[in-house]
Image (cartoon, grey):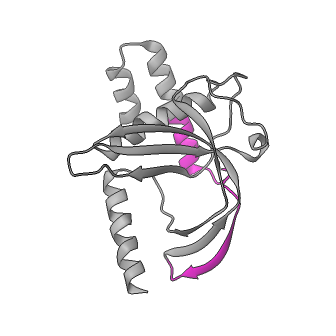
Amino acid sequence: MDVILSLVLVNSSDWREATSGLKMLKTIGQALFSTGLQYPKHSNLESKGEDYEVRTYEVTNWVSTTLTGMELDPAMNAGFRRLFKYIQGENERKEKVEMTAPVTCRVEPGAGPACETTFTVSFFIPEQNQADPPKPTNPEVFIENRPEFTAFVRTYGGFTNEQTHTHTHTHTHIYIYAL
């Protein structure tokens, strides 16, 4: 963690940006090492071995942002930063909102190999804000109401990046085809 903190300070020419980076790293650390995070309500329909579950998620609100690009990592980083500002008070009420899990990223591939991909990064809105989430002040951030859905879920720790996304995606396809 010390190395990351040093890099944020060295690479930042603006003290406010560095302070925001430190707050974000502290929140990320709390998210990684805390068991008290809120998750969207779901029911486990069945387990598929040790690695997977079939879950049905209830209707929920999420705060989201959409980006386009060629690679997942820069999109996730930029999206996370936008949403982090929202939960730190960049909303009409200037209200801090609790960090939750998971952070999701919907990936919509472009039409061809050299086309940009659309990434929608989202944070689950905590239960106490579900009925009336604070409205974002950044026009690139929006509240998204997700209907009930059923998902094939594999949980893993840490952050999603290009490498973990590719590994998990491949592992999931192999598992599904083996069923």
Q: Which image quarter is the N terminus in?
A: top left
Question: Of 72 and 28, which appears nearest the observer?
Answer: 72
From the top left corner, tell me how far across and down residue 129 is, in percent: 75, 40
Residue 159 in sight here: no
Question: Of 13 and 122, which appears nearest the observer?
Answer: 122
From the top left corner, tell me how far across and down residue 155 is, in percent: 51, 64
Q: Is residue 122 above or below residue 55?
A: above
From the top left corner, tell me how far across and down residue 178 is, in percent: 38, 85
Q: Which image quarter is the C terminus in?
A: bottom left
Q: Quadrant of residue 95?
A: top right
> Which residue sits furthest left?
114
Question: Of 179 and 94, which appears nearest the observer?
Answer: 179
Question: Of 1 and 18, which appears nearest the observer?
Answer: 18
Which span is picked out in magenta? 25-50
**Identity of the residue drawn at 65% across and 77% down:** 45
Position of 77 compared to 71: left or right?
A: right
